Amino acid sequence: MTSHQSTQNMKPATAAKKLGVYLEATPAEFQEGVVSRDELNALQADPPEWLRELRRNGPHPRPVVAAKLGVSISGLARGGVTEPLTTEQIEALKTDSPEWLQKERATQAEVRKEAARIKEKRAEQDEKRS
């Protein structure tokens, strides 16, 4: 009995998410087709110029914008940022440092601090069990 490995295909939206780019900014042929796992791996290993340009200048999807600003996606929404932003717009926000951004960064820092504390506590409990 031989097993045939079928090609795993994904929708363009899924591929764009895995690549960390905003789907609507990708070329039409990317948006209209399907992307195989092999094609995705090739795009990640050797990105074409359009992908390098999108990653460098945007527009960036919300998860990337949130990461670049050091806030959560919910924090972006609370700050009124609902659209994709370019790298230039993100840098301008960092420079202007509006009150909502300062608050959300502080909140995110607290969340990370608490997550680290919980992780450390669990590690200590695991050590005691061993």
Image (cartoon, rainbow, N blue to C red):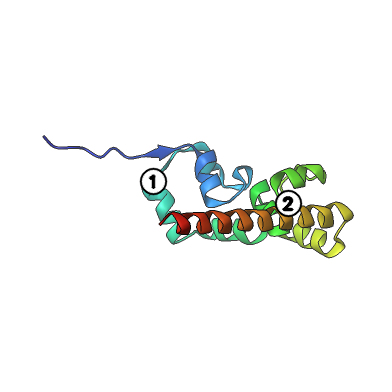
Is residue 33 shown to the viewer in this render?
Answer: yes
Query: What residue occupies the far front of the structure in this picture?
Result: 128
Give whichever of 124, 84 is nearer the camera.
124
Q: Is residue 117 left or right of residue 29?
A: right
Residue type beneath disc 1: Arg
Q: Position of residue 63 (x, y in %)?
A: 64, 49
Number of the label disc, if any, that sits on residue 85 = 2
Using the rendered image of the protein, determine whether residue 61 is visible from the camera's viewpoint: no
User: Does label 1 or label 2 sit earlier along the sequence?
Assistant: 1
SS under mark 2: loop
The one nearer the camera, 37 or 33, is 37
Which amino acid type corresponds to the residue marked 2 in the rendered image?
Answer: Leu
Q: Is residue 16 left or right of residue 100?
A: left
Answer few, some or many: residues within 10 Å of disc 2's Cα (few below 14, many 20 plus, some between 14 and 19): some
Counting from the top left corner in percent of width and height, residue 74 is at 73, 43
Q: Quadrant of residue 129?
A: bottom left
Q: Which mark is residue 37?
A: 1
Q: Nearer the viewer, residue 49 or 57?
A: 57
